[in-house]
């Protein structure tokens, strides 16, 4: 049974605050190589996917809720940086913060809807399952392309991301057929994501 509108309206801002705040705490407190998951765009994308999965139905509602989740997480992250590291609070309303919020809207729409699709049938289930897998594969590709001298221990991060991708295939895919198809679809999606990320970052 899908959650009520009241439940969604309560959970989304609270979850967004916790995502941003605890993400920064994770970066500061968790040792290498797992600390890098706090710097992971894939982690936030999968959080949006998980919210869509929880909402269960209603693509528009999932897209809006996941976007709000990620928008709230951005200032929450910077608030944690202010409280725990002494960063300037003004960064919350800096241009970079609004840029990340804009990316959050895009990611929220894509991955919030993916969470809904992963519960449906046919090609939508395959694509919905493949998308959260693809973001970890894409991130693993980016890690693999880093110079070992510039980023020691990079292969630990590659292994963690690929392990999480495999775990998501197993957990989200509801049959062997969906898992195999989703894994196959995730590869070109990851390649496309890597090209897009490089274009935006460049």
Image (cartoon, rainbow, N blue to C red):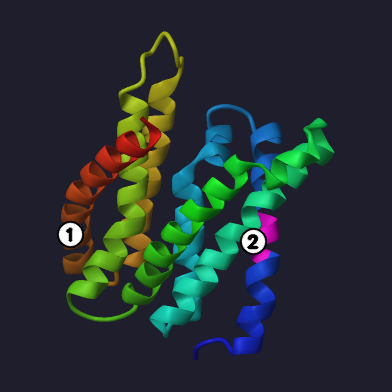
| Residue at numbered disc 1 | 180
Q: Residue at x 34, y 31 (%)?
A: 142
Q: Residue at x 20, y 47 (%)?
A: 187
Q: Are marks 2 and 1 in contact (CB under 8 Å)?
A: no
Q: Residue at x 24, y 65 (%)?
A: 127
| Outermost residue to the top | 149
Res 150 quadrant in image: top left
Sequence-first disc among 2 and 1: 2
Res 82 quadrant in image: top right
Foreground residue among 54 and 17? 17
| Outermost residue to the front | 95
Residue 175 is at least partly visible in this image: no
Q: Secondary structure at mark 1?
A: helix
Report the side of 109 relative to 88 (left or right): left
**Image: magenta residue range:** 15-19
Report the side of 161 relative to 199 (left or right): right
Q: Secondary structure at mark 2?
A: helix
Q: Residue at x 16, y 67 (%)?
A: 177
Q: Which percent across, then down, holds residue 163?
A: 37, 43
Q: Residues within 10 Å of mark 1 (few under 14, many from 20)?
A: some
Figure label count? 2
| Residue at numbered disc 2 | 16
Q: Which percent across, then down, holds residue 137?
A: 31, 43
Residue 20 part of the magenta-drawn span: no
Foreground residue among 64 and 91? 91
Q: Which percent across, then down, holds residue 134?
A: 30, 50
* Marking on residue 65: none
Residue 18 part of the magenta-drawn span: yes
Q: CA distance from mark 2 to mark 1?
A: 32 Å
Kindly report which numbered mark, 2 or 1, lies closer to the viewer in this rendering: 2
């Amino acid at each position: 049974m899908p959650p009520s509108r009241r439940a969604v309206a309560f959970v989304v801002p609270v979850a967004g605050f916790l995502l941003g705040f605890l993400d920064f705490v994770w970066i500061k407190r968790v040792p290498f190589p797992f600390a890098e998951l706090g710097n992971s765009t894939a982690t936030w994308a999968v959080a949006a996917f998980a919210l869509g999965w929880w909402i269960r139905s209603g693509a528009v509602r999932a897209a809006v809720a996941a976007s709000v989740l990620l928008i709230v997480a951005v200032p929450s992250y910077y608030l944690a940086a202010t409280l725990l590291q002494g960063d300037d609070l003004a960064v919350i309303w800096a241009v970079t913060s609004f840029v990340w919020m804009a990316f959050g809207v895009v990611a929220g729409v894509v991955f919030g809807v993916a969470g809904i699709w992963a519960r449906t049938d046919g090609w939508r289930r395959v694509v919905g399952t493949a998308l959260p897998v693809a973001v970890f594969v894409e991130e693993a590709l980016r890690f693999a392309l880093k110079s070992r001298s510039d980023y020691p221990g990079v292969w630990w991060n590659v292994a963690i991301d690929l392990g999480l991708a495999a775990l998501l295939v197993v957990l989200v895919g509801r049959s062997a057929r969906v898992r195999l198809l989703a894994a196959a679809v995730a590869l070109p999606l990851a390649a496309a994501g890597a090209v897009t990320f490089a274009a935006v970052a460049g």
